[in-house]
Image: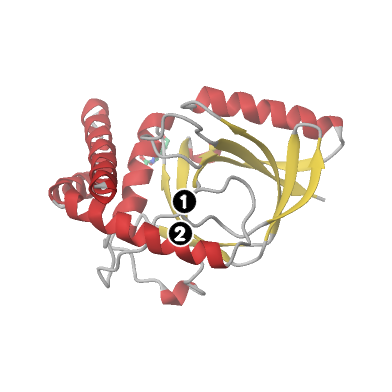
């Protein structure tokens, strides 16, 4: 019974995302034709995807339990390994090790809502089999949103599960707008977790607060590296968890 509910929830989650993305594209009159085609084909198979996702997530959960090397909010799916290396007034410092792989996509000239809907769907389709091996890859958390001022848009990123040791282990994305990005070791200052359903203004407000804390302590950061990290799916109503990260520079 619980499993059926989980499957229903996961499917509903996919449907809502695809619906939001489709509506956004319609309203804004964007001509992202290949994405629309993918949305249409993925909608019809979303139920299967939802079921698969549930099964895969359970496996991911078990593997995370055995190698408990992450930090930050603990959720039911794998999160990137990290170490807490310091605490400040209102923030935490986390070191993320070298060579963590992320699937990322940039949506240029776009509003936050549109860019994040399109970005999520592109990444989600890649892990749902939209790749050269039709390989399904388990969902991880958090979802990263990075404002990219120079492109007037936002980058969306999914962490690649740690069982993939190199980019060469990953299948080629069908969507050329999906990129693999191997992150270098970084110390990130983190504010949060905070709850609710934050939009861009809420994230920006948290980021401003974080910058004030870091300025006060004389820590330097790369302003363009801000990340809005969402650990909760839209279907979680209570105990929602979001953070803002920024890279510390020396
Ligand atoms: C974004 O806007 C710039 C400036 O108007 C334009 O040169 C560029 O082609 C646009 N990019 C996309 C992907 O629409």
Q: x, y percentage for residue 159?
A: 49, 57
Picture quadrant of ligand 1: top left
Residue at the spot 48% in from the left edge and 66% down from the top edge? 63
Q: Secondary structure at mark 2?
A: helix
- 2 and 1 marks in contact (CB < 8 Å): yes
In the image, farthest residue toward the bottom:
168
Q: Is residue 157 visible?
A: yes
Give the residue at mark 2: 61
Q: Residues within 10 Å of mark 2 (few under 14, many from 20)?
A: some
Q: Secondary structure at mark 1?
A: loop
Q: x, y percentage for residue 30?
A: 25, 35
Residue at the spot 36% in from the left edge and 52% down from the top edge? 123
Q: Residues within 10 Å of mark 1 (few under 14, many from 20)?
A: some
* Viewer-closest of 14 and 147: 14
Q: Is residue 247 above or below residue 211?
A: below
Q: Is residue 181 above or below residue 117?
A: below
Q: x, y percentage for residue 124?
A: 33, 51
Give the residue at mark 1: 76
Q: x, y percentage for residue 43?
A: 17, 46
Q: Is residue 111 visible?
A: no
């Amino acid at each position: 019974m619980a499993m059926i509910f989980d499957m229903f929830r996961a499917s509903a989650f996919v449907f809502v995302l695809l619906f939001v993305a489709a509506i956004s594209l319609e309203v804004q009159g964007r001509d992202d034709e290949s994405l629309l085609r993918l949305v249409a084909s993925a909608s019809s198979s979303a139920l299967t995807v939802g079921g698969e996702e549930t099964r895969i997530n359970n496996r991911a959960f078990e593997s995370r339990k055995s190698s408990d090397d992450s930090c930050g909010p603990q959720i039911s799916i794998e999160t990137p390994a990290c170490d807490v290396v310091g605490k400040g007034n209102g923030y935490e410092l986390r070191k993320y090790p070298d060579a963590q792989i992320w699937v990322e996509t940039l949506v240029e000239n776009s509003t936050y809502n549109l860019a994040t809907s399109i970005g999520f769907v592109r990444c989600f389709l890649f892990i749902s089999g939209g790749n050269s091996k039709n390989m399904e890859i388990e969902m991880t958390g958090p979802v990263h949103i990075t404002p990219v001022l120079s492109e007037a848009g936002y980058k969306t990123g999914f962490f690649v599960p740690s069982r993939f040791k190199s980019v060469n282990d990953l299948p080629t994305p069908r969507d050329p707008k999906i990129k693999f990005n191997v992150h270098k070791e970084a110390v990130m200052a983190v504010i949060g977790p905070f709850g609710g359903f934050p939009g861009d203004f809420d994230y920006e407000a948290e980021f401003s607060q974080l910058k004030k804390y870091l300025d006060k302590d004389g820590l330097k950061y790369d302003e363009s590296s801000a990340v809005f990290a969402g650990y909760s799916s839209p279907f979680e109503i209570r105990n929602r968890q979001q953070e803002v990260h920024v890279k510390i520079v020396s």
